[in-house]
Amino acid sequence: MTRQERSRSDMPRDLPLDTSATVTLDGSGKGTVILVPNVGQRWKDCLVSVAVSSSNNVPEFRFYKGNVAQSSLVDGTFTGNLNSSDALHNVVIPPGVPVIGVWANGDPGASATMSIRGMVTVP
C-alpha cells in the first residue's frame, strides 16, 4: 500500500446510521432508553423517531443530549407514538455522549422504541 493509499484509508468516512433501543413501560407508563455513539464515532444529521406498541393512554416523550436535565432537553412531544423530530439535524453527537429518550403516561407494559437515523462518522 502506498503512502497516499494509506492516508486515504485513514481518513474518517460517513456511513448511514440506523440504531434503536426499546423499553417496556413500567406500571406508571414510564420508560427510558439510551443510545450512545461508540468510541471514535460522531453522529450527525439525525432524525429521532418514536413508537409504542399500544397507546390507549397518550404517552409523552422527551429526549435529551448528555443527561436528563431541563438544560439538556432537545425536543419532545405530547404524542410519544408514531412521531419524529429533526431537532438533531444540525447537531453533532460526539463519542460517549448519550441521547436519552424518556416516556411518561404511556400504557403500562407497552413496548416503546426510539430510533435514530442519520450519518455516523467513523475513523
Image: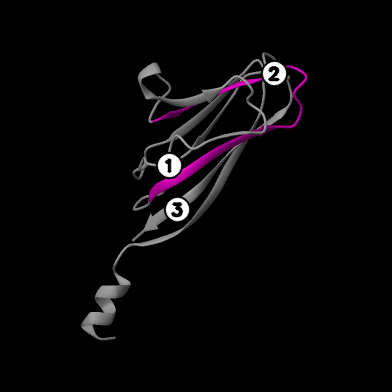
The amino acid on which the numbered mark 2 sits, given as a three-letter code, is Val
Instruction: Return the residue nearer the eye: 29 or 60.
Output: 60
* In this view, 113 is above or below 42: above
Q: Quadrant of residue 55?
A: top right
Residue at image mark 2: 58
Mark 2 residue element: loop
Residue situated in front as seen by the camera: 21 or 60: 60
Residue density around tag 2, few if under 14, some if 14–19, many if 20 or more, within 10 Å: some
Instruction: Return the x and y of residue 113 as percentages of the image width and height.
Output: 63, 35
Q: Earlier in the sequence, mark 2 or mark 1?
A: 2
Q: Which residues are magenta?
A: 42-65
Total residue callouts:
3
Q: Residues within 10 Å of mark 3 (few under 14, many from 20)?
A: many
Residue 58 position, x and y percent, is 69, 18
Camera-near label (3 vs 1) is: 1
Residue tagged by mark 3?
119
For the stretch drawn in magenta, what is the main secondary structure? strand
Left/right of residue 38 with respect to residue 48 in the rendered view: left
Query: For residue 114: magenta?
Result: no
Q: Residue 71 lies in what quarter of the image? A: top left
Badge 3 or badge 2: first in the primary sequence = 2
Q: Is residue 51 magenta?
A: yes
Looking at the rendered image, the disc whose residue lies closer to the viewer, 2 or 1, is 1
Is 53 on the left-hand or right-hand side of 23? right
Question: Residue at 25% of width from left, 86% of height from top?
Answer: 2
Residue in view at x 59 percent, y 39 percent: 21
For the rendered model, the colour scheme is: one colour
> Which quadrant is home to the C terminus?
bottom left
User: On the picture, is 94 further left or further right than 101?
Assistant: left
Mark 3 / mark 1, whichever is N-terminal: 1
Pointer 1 residue: 89
